[in-house]
Each structure stands twice: as C-alpha cells, then as structure tokens.
Image (tube, rainbow, N blue to C red):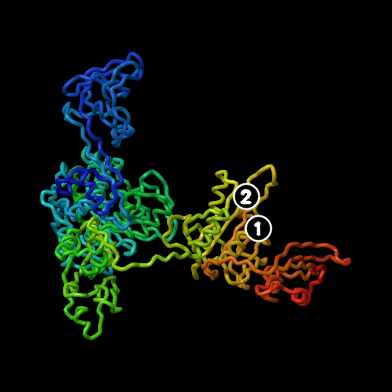
Amino acid sequence: MKFTFGWLLEHLDTTLSLEQVVEALISLGFEVENCHSIGRGFIVAQVTECNKHPGADRLTLCKVFDGTQELQIVCGAPNVRGGLKVVLAQVGAVLPCNMMKIKKSKIRGCESLGMLCSLEELGLPGGDKGGIIELSDDYRVGDAFTVDPLIEIAVTPNRGDMLSVYGVARELAAGGYGVLIGTYKPSFDGLYTERNHESGWHDSCEVENITPNHGSNVLSSPLTDSQGSAVVDELASNLLKKDANVEDDANILFNICDSTACRKFSGLVIRNVKNCVSPDWLRNKVERVGVKSISALVDIANYVMFSYGLPLHIYDLDKIAGETLQVSVSDEESYLAALNDKEYRVPPGSIIIRDRDMQLQAVAGIIGSKLGACTLSTRNIFIEAAVFNPVMVASTKRAMKINTESAYRFERGVDPYFTEKALVLAAQLISDVCAGEKEKIESFFTKDESKFIDFSLSFFSKLTGIELDSSKAIQILKGLGFEVHEMRMPHYRTCSESHSDNTNVGNRKNLATEDSIGNTHVSTAEVGVSSKKDLQIFRVVPPSWRSDVITQACIAEELLRVYGYAQLRSTPLKSKIPVIFETSKEDRIRELLLNRGFSEVVTWPFISEKKCSANENILRIKNPLGAEFNVMRPSIIPNLVEVAQRNIKNGLHVIKIFEIGKIYSTICEKKMLAGLIYGDSFPRNMHEKAHKMDFFDAKADVEALLTSLDLGGRYSFEKCDGPSLYHPGKVSNVKIEGKEVGFIGELHPRVASNRQITIFELFLDKLACNLKLKENTFGKFPIVERDFSFVFDLDKVPLWGDIERGLYLISDFIKNVTLFDKYEGDFKGKRMLSLAFFVSMENQTHGLSQEEIKSLSDQIICFVQGKFSGTLRLSC
C-alpha cells in the first residue's frame, strides 16, 4: 500500500514527523517497506543563458541563477532553454534514484557546479517523458524544492482495511498518534426506498449540497465512520419494502442473481458530465502512488479507492444496453476485451456483470470491459460501488492471470457499509471537476447477522502476562472501531468460594462455544475465574471493516498491538522443564540419507492435475493458486522429477534427492518418503569405467535405510506391477514381514524422457521402527558360512524373497542369507535356472558343532527341495 505523507495528514491531525510516523506504524505491527523522500539540497533555480558546449554537440553550457548567485551547469537535456525554471541539485545533494552524491566536476573540460534534474532522477512518476523538469511560474527562485514523501507498507492478507489512506490514519489515531479527521459527510435529501431480497435491502437517496475542499480534500464538517454508518442505518430503518428486481422509479435497473457472489451493490447515475483531463492536484495524487492518469472520471474513482479502500467502477451509461445491469455467476467460459487493451479468458464460476443484451460489461471486482469504458466524449455515467465475494474474486483473478488494485482489495474484503459514502464522495468530486446532474443512489444489500465475541481481561493476562486496566482496554478497542458492552456474570462463584464444595471452576470442561451465527460465548472455564474481578466480561462487536476478528485471541492481539509489544517483559519460568532430546523417525531417515549423499528438497503439496493418473482419487482444490496448482499431490514423485529435470537442464550430472511429506487423496492422507537418483555413481576418472546409477543403487540405499531403522522384522523385495509412474517390468515392492511398505524401480519412459532415473517410495506410517540407539556387539564364537546352489525348471522358478523368508524361519542360528549368483543354462540336457546363495550361522552361547551345522544344512536343503522343487547342485 502506497500513500504520501501529505495525503495521510488530510485524514490524521498529528504533530509527528515523517520518521515518527514510520516508527509508529512499525510499533503497531505494520512493516514499512519503503519511505521515499528527495531529501535536502534541491532548490528552484532559473536558467538565464544557454550556450553550446565547446567539446560536445549534445551538451549545453548553462548559466543558472539559484537565488543568490549564478552557477555554471553542464546539461544534456533537449528541453533546456533560457528563462526556464528548473530543479537544481546542489553540490552535496543525493539523487533518490541511485543515491549518487552530486559533486563539483568537469565535463568535457567545462566545470559543472550542480545538476538540473529530471522526474526520473528524483524518483517521481512521469520520468519516461524525457528532459528536465519544467516548473511553472508559481515557483519562486531560491526556494527549496520539496516533494511529498512516499510511504509504502506491507499489508497482510487479513488486513484489507489498511489498503486505504483513511485506514492507515484510523490505525494511527487508535494508537494515540493523532486525531482522526472524519470522512465526507453524505447528504440524503429526498425519498429513500428499500427493496427486499431475502435478508437484503435496496435503497435510494438524493445527493446534493456537498462542498469539499480540493486543496486539502478534508470536509469542513467531518463525519466519523460510526456516525456515517448510523446515518445510512437510520435512513434504512423506516423504508417501504418492495421486491428487489422490480423496476420502479430507479434510474438504472440492476438485478443481483446471486447474493452470495454480490453481498452489496450500490450505484449512482450522473448525467451531462464533461469528462476532461484531471486537474493537477488529482493527477499528481494518483501518479504519485504509481497509477497512470487516464481522465478525470477514472482518476476520481482511483482517488476514492486509495483514500477509503473501496474500489469504484464507472460505466459509460450510453454504452449499457437498456440501462440495465445483471450481476451473476457465469456457468460457461467467456472472453473479455478489457480496459487495458488485453483480452482475457473468463473461467466458469466467475462473477460477471452484463447488460440487457447480455454483453459482458465487467468481470466483477477485477476489471471492466472496453465496451463500457469512459472516454473524453462520455456524457452520462453510472458509478458502481459493490461488495463481491472475496474467494470468488481471488479464484477468478488467478485463473485470468491478472492482478489489479481493485482485485487486491476485494480478495481481502472491503467495508460493506461504506458504499454509499464512497458514491457520495465520488459524486462530489465529479460535480466539481466535470459538472453533471446527479440522480439517486440505488443499493442492494444482504446484511449479515451482527456477530459478537465475549472477552475477558483475565484471558488477555494469561496470554500475555500483562495486567491491563479495563478502562484502558475499552479505550483501545473503541479507538479501533469496536463496540464494547460491559457484562457481568453474578451467578458464577470464584474459585475460592467454590473450594469448600470441592468444585474448581477454572478446571471445568465448559469452554468457549460458538453459536449458529458465529458468536463466541465465554464460560468461566476459559475465563479462569479466580477472583471477583475475573467475572467481568466484555461483549465486543468488531467493526464492519474487521471481518478477520473472530476469537478472543484476535481481540487480545489487537489490545497488545496498540498497547505495545515493547510492554512484554521477559519472565523466568516458574518451574524447571527437563530438556529431552528425542530423535524422530523422520530425523533418523534424514540423517542416514544425507550421509549417503542425498540432498533433501521441499516442494509444494499441490500440483497440476495433468501430472496425475486418471485412476487416482484426486483431491481437487476449490480455490487454487493457479492452473498449475489445482490438486493436492497424490504422489511426491512428480515434484522430485520436476526438480531433477530442472537441475539436469542447468548442467548437474549427478542427482540424489529425497523429500519427506504428505500425499493426499479423497480418502486419506499419508506420510511418505520419496527419493530419486540419476547420473554417474562416481565422477569420471582414468581408473574406473563410468557407471550409471540404477535400480540396484537405489535398492542398496533403501536396504541401508531399513537396516538402520531396526524395523523388528525381515524385509524383502518382490517384483510387482507398481504404480503408474514406474517402468513396467522394472519395479519391485518393499515388504516387511510380508506387508507392503513401499516401491522401488525405474521411472516410466514417458516421464523419464529417455533418461535412466530410479525412484523409490516408502509409507512412513507403516514403518514401526526402534529409535533407540543399538549397541553393536560382536559374537564370542565363530560364524559359519555355507554355500548352496539349486537349479529350478524355468517355468517353476520361485521368487527369491519367498526362499529368503523361509530360510530365516528354519532356525534362530541363521543370521544372514545372501543371493550371490544367478545363472541360466543347460543342466542334464534341459534349460534350467541356477540360484546360488550363502547362509551365515552363529550361536551366541557356544560354537556350532559339526553335527549342528550338518543338521541346519540338511534342513535348508529339505526346505528348498520340498517347498520350491529345487534340485541341489552344490553344497559346500
């Protein structure tokens, strides 16, 4: 949010300097991103004489009078001439554009004692016009040249009320940094009628006799927000009820088809206007905050938006078919030729505004159509001030890939009670600048139930450790626009009074509750009643511009923010809490993979639906960031592949990455570990031949991981079909005691783009690991190893995982089984498959005897022959 210091002072009566205002905003919790001021050393001067530079064709040697003396300045601007009043940067001044300090210098052999400045060099809008600044005759030579300092603050998504100069002034006034100067006072002379639509109302009023001061833009008879809303509410209280969509004596008929999309719609017709170029004061204001000046009508709409935070849209009434507008939610795709001379695709589900001939006049809250644009020939206008659904505006804005000042405010929420006042202000300014004949304001409004929050200062004290006086709390809240009603709960006893009947009120389970319309009620359990003082409860009603305040914690934050974060004091804990160092499963996995050369990545949990398989239970996002992030990821692998491909394009030849995160479906969400490897297993060198990392490298990493986690069971790998992202025929599942816990394999060729990429996934929720550090012990007795080789018919070859699992079940003395050879060939005149493996045997209490070794070997042979029809080829 950008605004000038002078603009702020039109709404805030304060004696603070620019630096003090910046400090005040920071203390209230707002980040000041930039504060632009041209500083000292810039004065008004006059060029008295111009001569051609003797050493350069494009330079001019100027004589410049600064009010006390005549200086020689070398200038390269094409518009410099004798008699011109200019801005002179004296020696020692610092240019705002690049922080360059002006020094006495020689340019092509001629001395220059300063610099004649352009708009761009002073950091002012309009710098693309070229040439130095040409000042009017109103400026006096020798006076300091000053520019209203520009302040830019960062506004969080919940504080849409701060996207206006008046909102900033209101916050500073609430913090005690000045007195708020009220808004324009609306005059409602004439019949005020109402139309009902469910809980909504429609009204109209005359706009007459409003006289602002354009110099200061502050009314002589100001009206505060609460007073202004009271005027509107009072006028709306005794109205004749009619149907919302029936045309009566209204100036323009508008039809609100969906009140959830458009909560409020107000409009005003002004006829016989004379649109023109904006006066200097208006053009300078909008350009100073970075908005291009178009015409008086458009600039007035922007001025009201920046001043009070409510976007307006002005239509050329003669271009609206039948002088009729319809606000609805589109059910099909359409295209908009927008005001910025670009065409946009408008997705279904957008709030659109059409006329009687169903011509698209605007995408509500975002941008208008060129069809109804105001030009210098516009004579009759309709001004729209509305409140559109923030979620729908944000969704449409992202789908259209456009960002406007209007959408930026609507998606954060605007004050629904300010539309009439905004129209009155706009009408006032248009009347002064463009003349015209005003008609009646028309309004449609779907009112919400008034919500309140029950709040206790004891809650604030427990949360912050600060004892805040009730009068101070009420003063702060009322200064922020909250309504505060003091309540008491005499039917509750304090904790001390309840102790006699063994009832501890502070430990009751009856916590704060929320009723059907969102009001928060507080019981003594949440208040924590311990004294008579704690029985004091305040019923707080947030102002219409603070829809983000919904709980007691929100109110406590507002109190602390204004009271001062600096008031928080460091307090030692009343009890000692032992420090417990625990290693989580995820931390153990990270440590092991990092030690094996992996890098951890963190990616978005949402991806494009195009990256998902058709048979997956996809969880779609109702309000996505964009088309590329419209579903929750059903797998982490697509994210890792995107990271790998980006790094491969950047010249990285070896990639080992992993991520620990959640995957989502319409049924559940699961915690996953996903990994990816690609490239050479070691750098190229003269001693070894390059080896591309493959399935077995990834399998080794997974095995090392499973071994380190001490899963309490045997793991195995079995060939399977696998998920759709894996290469068919080159994928295996990972099992622990027969239960599937993950997959490992090569990436599918359609995704891998002719690259050999290997991936793996493990379901972390299925890994019940022992996180205690194990002590490695060495046996006192020798380990015995025996090799076995069996042959199998090619049509009856068993899975190695089944053989391995069975061998471990034979005896606890079998500590390790490893397959070391696989061979297919002729055996007794028949094609057979040979599998060779070794078995390690160990007894922790004594050395194995020859009889025990022979017995175990016989059991192994009998198991393989009987279970899998294998023929012993060799045993040693």
Q: Quadrant of the rendered structure where residue 677 is?
A: bottom right
Label annotation for residue 679: 2
* Residue 372 drawn above or below residue 787: above
* Residue at image location 23% in from the left, 51% down from the top: 168
* Residue at image location 17% in from the left, 61% down from the top: 478
Asked if residue 250 can be seen in this view, the reply is no
Q: Residue furthest bottom?
A: 501
Asked if residue 476 can be seen in this view, the reply is yes
The crowd level at tag 1 (other Cα within 10 Å; few <14, some 14-19, many 20+) is many
SS for dot 1: helix
Q: Quadrant of the rendered structure where residue 239 is?
A: bottom left
Q: What type is the residue that disc 1 sits on?
A: Phe
Residue 463 image position (x, y, % from top left): 27, 66
* Residue 505 drawn above or below residue 187: below
Residue 383 image position (x, y, % from top left): 26, 52
Residue 624 image position (x, y, % from top left): 43, 58
The crowd level at tag 2 (other Cα within 10 Å; few <14, some 14-19, many 20+) is many
Q: CA distance from mark 1 to mark 2?
A: 12 Å
Q: Nearer the viewer, residue 129 or 809?
A: 809
Q: Quadrant of the rendered structure where residue 117 is?
A: top left
Q: Which one is earlier in the sequence, the residue at label 1 or at label 2?
A: 2
* Residue at image location 24% in from the left, 39% down from the top: 284
Q: What type is the residue that disc 2 sits on?
A: Gly
Q: Residue furthest top?
A: 54
Q: Nearer the viewer, residue 622 or 32?
A: 32
Residue under label 1, please give it: 695
